[in-house]
Image (tube, rainbow, N blue to C red):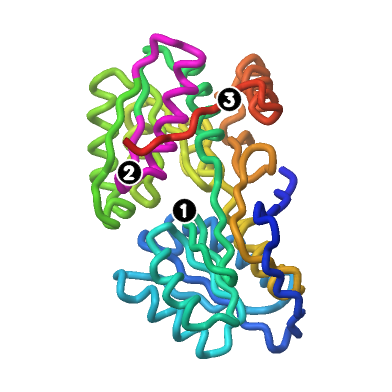
């Protein structure tokens, strides 16, 4: 997978063009609820810092949030300690980023999956509906019952976007497909509840679902385990999770948070960092679906060809994937 091109859509982006000597560079990252090792969203972000350190030898300061009040506190502490760029993982950190960025206008901030309209903030978002659409197609092509499942984490528009893309993709292949949807909760705890994730998956399996897609952070571990235990298929999210249950994970809706984190930190180091919004989809290789040795036997050549055609059509604009609209 080639790296995405990061393109700001501002007409006149603010450019912070002063390169920083490696010895003085001290980037920081703040993970959100679910933890650094959630095998999903946060861990993908961590992979970006690992790559940065491997290439430069520079450590990235880290903090794992366990309650909301810690977000702005951590950003303030990092800024006071001289971090030139601070990356916040997750939409829920938007208000903290806004407050900290106003207090420290000379510090560069980046937020993943959120938007903060300040000149020293880079807001990185993804077209998750595009990868979810392809995963929905794959699920419908693999399903024997025509019934599919979706387990989301926190009930927010971002996760509803995953659900809609998945449903639309399934119905693109099979208009009669039925998609059961459940959200784990309405608070941040929904990202870290594998027990409930497993219960929701079992309920959907009981209704006939034989492929279940999760977009739920660490909660997804329970979803995927339940599918494996029942002899059904699951679909991973954010990171490539095919390896967690080889032969049981149909594919994963990959979101290149790792590349986004790596690139924003590297750009800050090199003096090419730009504030403003960035949106990454299939065309930029910012999202996609995973195919490797762990799921190779589950994706037939015919399925792969169908998905490849749809991907090309989405990139060209021939196939339109609908945006989720808040009701």
- Residue 319 is situated, as x and y percent measured from the top left of the image, at 61, 22
Please report contact status of discs 3 and 2: CB closer than 8 Å, yes or no: no
User: In the figure, 10 relative to 163: above or below?
Assistant: below
Q: Which secondary structure, mark 2?
A: helix
**Could one spot residue 224 in this view of the protein?**
no
Q: Which residues are magenta?
A: 150-178
What residue is pinned by disc 1?
39
Which mark is first along the chain, 2 or 3?
Answer: 2
When asked about the image quadrant of residue 203, the answer is: top left
In the visual, does 150 lie left or right of 206?
Answer: right
- Residue 182 is situated, as x and y percent measured from the top left of the image, at 27, 35
Which mark is first along the chain, 3 or 1?
Answer: 1
Discs 1/3, front: 3
- Seen at 58% across and 63% down, the residue is 122
**Could one spot residue 31 in this view of the protein?**
yes
User: Looking at the image, how many numbered discs can be counted on the residues?
Assistant: 3
251 inside magenta stretch = no
- Residue 53 is situated, as x and y percent measured from the top left of the image, at 67, 72
What residue is pinned by disc 3?
320
When asked about the image quadrant of residue 152, the answer is: top left
- Seen at 48% across and 33% down, the residue is 323
- Seen at 58% across and 72% down, the residue is 120
- Seen at 25% across and 36% down, the residue is 200
């Amino acid at each position: 997978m080639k790296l995405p091109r990061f393109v700001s859509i501002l007409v006149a982006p603010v450019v912070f063009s002063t390169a920083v000597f490696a010895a003085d560079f001290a980037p920081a990252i703040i993970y959100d609820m679910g933890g650094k090792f959630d095998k999903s969203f946060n861990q993908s972000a961590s992979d970006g810092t690992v790559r940065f350190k491997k290439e430069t030898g520079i450590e990235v300061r880290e903090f794992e949030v366990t309650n909301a009040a810690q977000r702005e506190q951590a950003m303030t502490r990092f800024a006071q300690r001289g971090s030139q760029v601070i990356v916040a993982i997750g939409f829920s950190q938007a208000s903290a980023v806004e407050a900290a960025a106003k207090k420290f206008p000379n510090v560069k901030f980046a937020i993943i999956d959120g938007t903060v309209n300040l000149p020293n903030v880079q807001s990185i978002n993804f077209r998750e509906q595009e990868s979810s659409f392809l995963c929905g197609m794959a699920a419908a092509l693999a399903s024997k019952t025509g019934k599919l499942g979706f387990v989301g984490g926190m009930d927010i528009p971002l996760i509803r976007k995953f659900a809609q893309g998945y449903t639309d993709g399934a119905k693109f292949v099979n208009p009669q497909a039925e998609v059961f949807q459940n959200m784990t909760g309405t608070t941040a705890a929904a990202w870290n509840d594998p027990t409930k994730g497993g219960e929701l998956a079992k309920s959907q399996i009981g209704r006939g679902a034989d492929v279940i897609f999760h977009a739920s952070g660490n909660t997804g571990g329970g979803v995927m385990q339940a599918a494996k235990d029942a002899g059904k298929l699951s679909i991973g999210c954010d990171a490539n999770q095919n390896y967690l249950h080889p032969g049981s994970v149909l594919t994963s809706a990959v979101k290149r948070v790792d590349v986004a984190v790596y690139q924003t930190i590297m750009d800050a180091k090199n003096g090419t960092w730009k504030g403003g919004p960035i949106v990454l989809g299939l065309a930029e290789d910012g999202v996609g679906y995973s195919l490797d040795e762990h799921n190779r036997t589950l994706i037939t050549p015919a399925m792969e060809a169908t998905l490849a055609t749809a991907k090309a059509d989405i990139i060209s604009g021939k196939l339109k994937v609908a945006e989720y609209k808040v009701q």
